[in-house]
Every structure is written in C-alpha cells, then in structure tokens.
Amino acid sequence: MANGITLSAGVRANLLSLQNTAQLMQTTQNRLATGKKVNSALDNPINFFTSQSLQSRAGDLNSLLDSMSNGIQTIQAANNGLTSITATVQSMQSALNQARQDSSWQSAAYTIDATTIGTATVKNLSFTGGAVTGTVNIPVNSITTAGTQSTLSTAAAYLAPSVANPASVQSGPFYGLSGASTYTFKVNGQDINLTSSATGTQSGDTLAHAKTSIQAQLDARFGVGSFTVGSNIAGDGFSIIGKADGTNDVNISNQNGSGAAATQATFAGAAYTGLGVGETYTFDFNNGTSTTAISLNNATGNNVANAAASIQSQLDTAYGAGEYTVTVNGSSGITITGRADGANSVIISNQASGGGATTANMGLGTTTQTVNGAVANNTSGLGLGATPQTAYGIPADPYEFTVNGATVTVAAGTGLAAAITSINAQLTTAGSKFEAFDNSGSLGIREITAEGTTLTLGGADATSLFGATLTNTGTATGTAGVKTVDQLVAAINADPGLTGKVKAINDSGTLRITNLSLTDLTLTGATTTAIDGGAGTRTIAGNNVRKGLVQQFNTLRDQLNKYATDASYNGINLLSGDNLRLMLNENGSSNINIQARDENGNPLIISATSLNINVAQNSDFDSNDSINNIVLNLTTSLATLRSQGSAFGLNLSTVQNRQDFTKAMINTLQTGADNLVLADTNEEGANLLALQTRQSLSTTALSLSAQADQAVLSLFQ
C-alpha cells in the first residue's frame, strides 16, 4: 500500500541505494560478530547442513574417546596384575630352587645288637611315616627255611597246538556233460575247462573223466601237490583240496557252462475207465534206480481223480514228497511227471488186472513205458553252483615262547606229556634253571631248585598260554644268621618301598639311617642306640628347612590369586575372564573384544588353578625330582602369563593407535565443517569500511537530491 508521499526520481534512487547499503552493512556486521559467513540454512543451505553433519560426526567420535581411555586403563590394570603375578611365580621358583639346594636331612646311627636279635625267629626293622607308604619291613636276621620255586602255569588246561587244516571245496552231484557242451570255472583265478561232444571220450562227460581232467589242469597251472582232486562226501561229485599244510586257499569263481537244460520225465496215459467192485489193477513203478509196486482197487481207483490221488500217495511214500507229481490230463487219463531238474525217470512195467478189469482200460498201456529225465549240464547241474565260494586253509600253529630268554617250541598236535619232554630237552640244552611239569592238566614252568631266581616268560604265545602274569619270583632256601651292617645297608637301599625315601650307609661300623622326607620317620625294632628287632620305636625328624619353604610357596600362591582378583578397573577385570568390548567408530561397525584366552581361544581366568599351580604338600618337597616337576609347571605357567601379557600389549597398541586416529579424524571433520561456514574477518572488515563510505556518499547524494525540491519551495516565499 502506498504511503501517499511522492518523491522525486532522484531522491527515490538515492534512498534505494542507501537502503541496500544499510542491508549489506547489517549482513557484514553479523558475520563479523559471529565469525561465520553461514549462520542459518537461509545463508547457504548446502554448506550449513554439510557443516552440521560433519560437526555431528566429530561429536560422536569425540564421545568414543572416553570409552577408549577407560579401555586403555582397564588393559593397564590387567597388565599390572600380570606383572605382579609373574613376579610372584618367579618368587615361587626361587623358593623351589632354595628347597632343591637344601640337604638338611635328619639321620640317626645304630649299632647291631646281634645277641638280642638271634636266629630263633625272623625279626624286622620296620619303617613307617616319612615318605614311606604303609609299612616296609627289612629282615635283620634269617632262619633256616625251605625255599619256594618260581612257578608259572598255563591259564587253562593244556591244549595241543593246532594242526594244519587244508582248504576244501565240495561240489554237489556232477551229472556229466552231454552233447557238444562246455563247462568252465576258475580256481584261485586260473581257468579250468571241461568239454564233451556228441561222440568220443571228453574231459567232462563223466565224473571220473572230470576229476582226472581237473587234477591235470591244476597241476599244470599251480604245480604238482598244490591241489588234490577227489570225491565229495556223498560220492556223486568231486572235491578240490588245498595243500595238506593249510598254506593255500581254494577260491571257486566265474562258473560258466553251455549245454543242455534239464529234461523232465513225463508220461501221459490214455483215458482211465475206473475199477468196479472186486476189480484190481497193479503195475511196477521204477525211478531209474529202484522199483515200487503200485496197486488200485474199487475203493482207491473207482474214478480217475481217486486213482491219481492214490498213485500220488504211494509214490510219495516210496520216494518222498516232491519227487513225482500225479495229475489228471485232458484225456481223462493219468499223467506222472518226474522232478523238474530231470534227476529221476518214469518207468512203468508189469501192468496186471483182476476181477474183470483190463489193463487196456487203465490208460497206461500194456507194455513197459520208459521216460528218462535228463539233468542240466550247465552251471546249475554240475555241482559248483553259480556263485563264488572260498575255503580257507589253516596252517599248523605250534607254540613258541621263551623261558628267561631261552626259546621253546612245541610242535603242532603235541600232547601235554610229549610237550613236557620236548620243552625239558630244549631247556636242558640251553642250560636253563627251569623245567616243564604237569600241573594238574596245565603246562607248568618252574625252578628246578629253589634259588629265588625270577621266572620270566615271553615270546609270541606267552600271554595266550600263561595269561597276563608273565613273571614270578620264588624264595631261596634260607640259612640262619644275623645280618651285618653292610647287609642291612644293601637291603634298605635296594628295597623299592624305601628307594628315594630312606638312605642307609655304613658310618664307621654303625648303621646310619637318613630320613629323606619332611615328615617324621618312625623305626620299629630299634632302641635309642641299637637295632634289636624288638617292639621299641625311634623317630627321625623331617627336614624343617624344606617344610618352611613349603609354607612360603603356598603363601605366594595365595597372593597370586589376590593379585588376579584385584586387577580390575571400573568394574571390569580382564584376569577374571571379563570381556571388554570397545566401539571404534560412530556406527559400531568397527569394534574390538579384549579378553584373556588360552591357546585354544577359550576364555581364560588367570588363577593358580588355571596356571596349574597346586597347593604344595610336604611330600612334594621330599625329593628333588618332585621339586623339578613343580619347577617345570611354573615354567609353563610363566610362558602362559607372558603370552597373555603379549596379547594384552597388542590390544593396548591397537586401542592407542585407534585413539590417535580418532583424534585426527575429529580435527579433520571440525576443520572441514568450519571451512564451510566461517567468514574471512579481514575481508568482511574491508567490506564494512567500503559500505560505511558508500553510506556516507549515499546520504550526501540524498541531501543534494532533496535540495532541488527545496528550490521549488522558495517560489512560494
């Protein structure tokens, strides 16, 4: 809406210029006041929002620096714990080394009271306590006793060693080839061929010829004596037998035959009229081997169906069910059929009738009727079947074992008595102190005389014959006497129950016993000064220096667990298996999980238990060998600690590198954001000075423009 005031063109132009200059001065003054050339989206929407996005990302990254700093301190806390634990383990090693070097073993010296000990009864010096398990008795004298022979016997009643069993394949019935036929099979991969023809003698026309031919072919292919061809058990076929010593097998395969199939014997009679009252009909039936009389009368043969049923029953009784089938044929006559494989014949003879009946009306004819079956002369009819078959030979298996190193062999099939004789002859030749004997049906080996010699049986068949116990030691014949100091020293030091636990020496004619343990050792059979084999006891104290080191070791172990428990920061303890997850970028796509892990990658809790450092017992410090085992365990523990420290160091380096990277990224983002929105104060200052000058000039110009209007006003004065 117009204000109703009319200005001249010159005034209005100068006024507009002055207004524009004032607006530019306001913009420039705002930039100088804020230091930014883009203060809102209206100034420059692209730069404004881009700068804001960069500042937001810089802020997100800046918030991650605190968690990274906390993570670094958490790793440092865990490293502090590892450092202290490592120092503790090294201190434990020092305690072990000190114990290993200590030899403050307690001992006592005794004389031998031979008079009190005597030889009337066996008396002992007994050891209990200390490192000794249970009670160990060392005889201090001997009396006259009978010895016991070292003896071992077979685990069960003696059985003679296995004799050879040759491999054997038995064929079924061999009917022989007929016509122009062949039959082949393989024996252990080698071809065997049988043939026949319409005329002349051939290798497969009869069983005898087949056996001769198979034998000749086997001899040619494998050598004479490798196989023997004989008769099968039933006598109607052949057998192939391997070597008598059982060292070869018999494998039959690839059976193949080309020849006639089986011919079934069948005779079909003419119409059967039936028998009336008082009429009879008889005939002889032969299967090719034996003859059976068949009879019919009015009750069994009044019609063809009854006659067929009666004949069937009589044939089943004579030859067995399935040998013949009797049916009524289409001519109302009787049909008699033999086996499908052609193995029997149908021979009818001596037909006779009575009581008015005639043989002609029975349909079987009046003369002898012969129909012979013919068996197949291919693979199904020549005895070996159609599938591969293998018989395995079993060689002889003599017994072989050793008696204190002397080799003994018992031949296959040798009975107990002969075995004992053979073994003793072999042992005598070897100069052995042992002999074989009959131990109630078992084979026994024993010392010839009781000398306390250990019997040891070995060799291939020792375990199967004599069971798991293959050593036995008897006792020598004892003679009376009190042992000397040297004899007792030898007996104590040689006893496996005292080795490494008690030590004995001859100390200027006295028996000095040293307790190689941290626990008190008790001797029974000793007085304060002498060994007498009585009921008195004497105590030899344990090693107190090593005992104190055991306590130091366990104290250090306890501190190890406390260091691990206390190595936490801000509620997270990496040594207790906690997982420290640090986000490394603003969207969480980059992160790191820091956790103690074993060599298999499983979470690991650092403690004495996980480091395989057990609470030490006094017995662990009894011997240097057991101390060495603990030292080895500690060495492994130190390797685990150092490996874990290295892993934490790698994690710390990763987080520190990421921290430096994040700081650099924040600076880059903030610089980029500022570059988009910050104003150049020098430029803006120059702009303001120029605008102030322009404003003054515009004001002067406006004043000059207004003077023209004032000249008009003077006309009215």
Image (cartoon, helix red, strand yellow):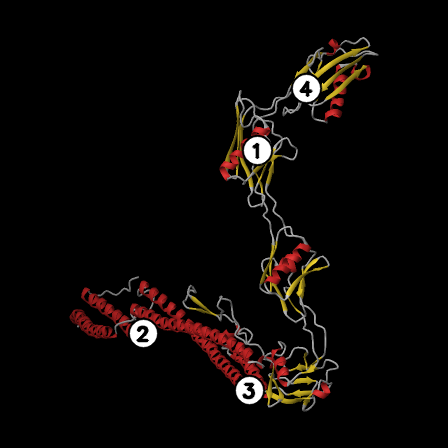
According to the image, label 1 marks what residue? 386
Can residue 388 be seen by looking at this rendering?
yes
Can residue 571 be seen by looking at this rendering?
no
Q: Position of residue 32 (x, y in %)?
A: 28, 74
Name the image quarter holding the N terminus. Answer: bottom left
At numbered mark 1, what does the secondary structure look like: helix, strand or loop? loop
At numbered mark 4, what does the secondary structure look like: helix, strand or loop? strand
Image height of 664 relative to 482, above or below = above
Q: Tell me which corner region of the image, top left, top right, bottom left or bottom right, holds residue 473.
A: bottom right
According to the image, label 3 marks what residue? 103
Q: Is residue 609 left or right of residue 532?
A: left
**Do the residues under discs 3 and 4 have CB atoms within 8 angstroms?**
no
Q: Residue at x 63, y 85 (%)?
A: 485
At numbered mark 2, what does the secondary structure look like: helix, strand or loop? helix
Q: Tell me which corner region of the image, top left, top right, bottom left or bottom right, holds residue 37.
A: bottom left
User: What is the C-alpha distance between the residues marked 3 and 4?
Assistant: 110 Å
Q: Amino acid at mark 3?
A: Ser
Q: Nearer the viewer, residue 283 or 25?
A: 283
According to the image, label 2 marks what residue? 34
Q: Amino acid at mark 2?
A: Thr
Between disc 1 and disc 4, the foreground one is 4
Q: Earlier in the sequence, mark 3 or mark 4?
A: 3
Q: Earlier in the sequence, mark 3 or mark 1?
A: 3
Q: Amino acid at mark 4?
A: Val
For disc 1, the neighbor class at 10 Å (few under 14, some 14 to 19, many from 20) is some
Q: Nearer the viewer, residue 58 or 559?
A: 559
Q: Earlier in the sequence, mark 3 or mark 2?
A: 2
